Image: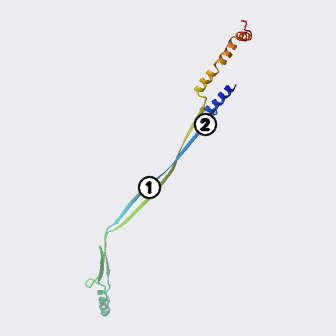
Amino acid sequence: MKKLIYIIVLMFTLTSCLGTKKTIESSSATKQTEKTETTKDSSSTVETNKAIQDRVVINVPKSDNKEVTAMFERLMQQLNTSKSSGSNSYNMRYDAETRQLLLDFIVGQTQNKQLATNSDTKTELSFEQQVETNTKKIIKMIPWYLWVGLGIIFLPQIINRVTMITNPLLAFAKKKHNGNNSF
C-alpha cells in the first residue's frame, strides 16, 4: 500500500495539476492619418479702355465796347496753359483770330485688372485601429512514461482482474487451490 501512495505522490509531483489553461494576449495599434488637400483657383479679368482725344471749342462773344473787349482779350490770353503726365495731358489756349477758347484733352489707354483667388482646403482625418488577439489553450496531461511505469508496476493486478472478468470460474478455482494444497 505504501508503494501505491508513493507512486500517486510521484505522479502528482511530476505532472502538477491536470486541466486546461487559457491565455489571451491582446495587442492593439492605432494609426492616425491626416490628409489635407488645398485647391487654389484664380481668375484674372483685364478690361482695356482705349485712349481718348477730345477737343472742346468755346466761342467768346464780342462786345460793342472796345475797352471791355480789350480787357476780355487780355484775360483770355492769360488762360493759355498745358499739363502732361505720362500719356495723359490737357492743353488750353485762346485763339484771338477766331475768338475761340480751345481745350484739348488726351487721356491715355487704361486697364482695369481684377484678380479673384479662391482657396479651398479639405482636411480628412482617419483613425485605423488594429487589434490582434492570440488565444492559447494549454492542456496538461500525464506524461506517457508515467503511464508505462504504472502499467508495469500494476501489471500482475491488471492481469488478475481481466482474468476474473473473462473467466470468473477460473478465479474461484485458483482461490480454492491456493487454500487447499491437496490439488
Q: Foreground residue, 155 or 65?
A: 155
Label 2 sits on a secondary structure element that is strand
Q: Residue at x 63, y 19 (%)?
A: 155
Q: Position of residue 37 (x, y in %)?
A: 45, 53
Q: Are marks 1 and 2 in contact (CB under 8 Å)?
A: no
Label 2 crowd bin: few (<14), some (14–19), many (20+), radius 10 Å: few
The numbered dot on residue 22 is 2
Location of residue 50 with respect to 172 vertically, above or below:
below
The numbered dot on residue 146 is none
Any part of residue 57 in sight: yes
The numbered dot on residue 38 is 1
Q: Foreground residue, 6 or 145?
A: 6
Question: What residue occupies the far top of the structure in this picture?
Answer: 183
Q: Residue at x 36, y 64 (%)?
A: 47
Q: Which of the 4 image quadrants contains residue 98?
A: bottom left
Location of residue 76 with respect to 166 vertically, above or below:
below
Q: Position of residue 118 (x, y in %)?
A: 43, 59
Label 1 crowd bin: few (<14), some (14–19), many (20+), radius 10 Å: few
Q: Distance of mark 1 from mark 2, alpha carbons? A: 52 Å
Q: Position of residue 34 (x, y in %)?
A: 48, 52
Location of residue 138 with respect to 113 vertically, above or below:
above
Q: Say which amino acid is labelled 1.
A: Thr
Q: Position of residue 157 (x, y in %)?
A: 67, 18
Q: Residue at x 59, y 34 (%)?
A: 138
Any part of residue 91 in sight: no
Location of residue 47 with respect to 89 vertically, above or below:
above
Q: Say which amino acid is labelled 2.
A: Lys
Q: How many numbered marks does the figure carry?
A: 2
